[in-house]
Amino acid sequence: MIVYVDSSVLARAYLADEQGHREAALLLDDTDVGLVTGTWTRIEVSGAIVRASAAGGIDRAGLLELLDSDLGDAGRVAVVTADQAEIEAKALTLVREHGLRAMDAWHLAVAVLTLPDLAEPGEETGLATRDEKQGEVAQALGLVLV
């Protein structure tokens, strides 16, 4: 199975006090699942780490380094993209048809546009998200929720 990991899940993998941390960390460690995410995820998750570090108790530099490693060339999560105009058009459609928040629509657009080309014939494609509405729309678009 190949799974698009939304930033809402990826951030939890690094922030141990967040609800869903254990499940997110286990997903990142699952070598039977191909994990991908979009280019904006690094920015969103970095912001979550920096905000969490302001409250104290976490190793900001260490977590940012781990994030960069996980999203690097040999990392656990491949960073994917599609044509920017296609992403924006699909995201706009998702916002207008389903009322998704802009970044939730952006992530889902990237998933829908990239996963079919990445999957092997017959391989399931999925989305890992913590957002209920984004998950509902993903399922309607044929993605399996992880």
Image (cartoon, rainbow, N blue to C red):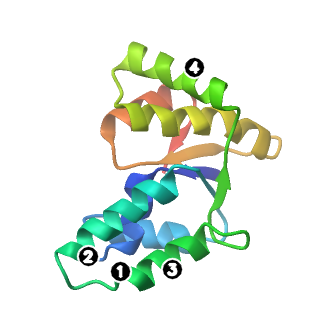
Position of 14 relative to 35 (above/below): below
Can you name the residue that lies furthest to the left here? 55
User: Disc 2 to disc 3, how far (Cα)?
Assistant: 14 Å
Q: Position of residue 119 (x, y in %)?
A: 76, 45
Q: Residue at x 41, y 38 (%)?
A: 103
Relative to the observer, which residue lies in front, 111 or 3? 111
Which label sits on residue 65? 3
- Describe the element under mark 4 as helix, strand or loop: helix
User: Disc 1 to disc 4, how far (Cα)?
Assistant: 35 Å
Residue 97 found in image quarter = top left
- Describe the element under mark 1 as helix, strand or loop: helix
Crowding at dot 3, Cα within 10 Å, few <14 / some 14-19 / many 20+, comes out as: few
Is the C-beta separation of discs 4 and 2 under 8 Å? no
Who comes first in sequence, dot 4 or dot 2? 2
Is the C-beta separation of discs 1 and 3 under 8 Å? no
Who comes first in sequence, dot 2 or dot 1? 2
Who comes first in sequence, dot 1 or dot 3? 1
Which label sits on residue 53? 2
Res 1 visible: no
Position of 112 relative to 40 (above/below): above
Q: Position of residue 108 (x, y in %)?
A: 51, 35
User: Disc 1 to disc 3, how far (Cα)?
Assistant: 9 Å
Which amino acid type corresponds to the residue marked 1 in the rendered image? Answer: Arg
Residue of label 4: 89
Which label sits on residue 60? 1
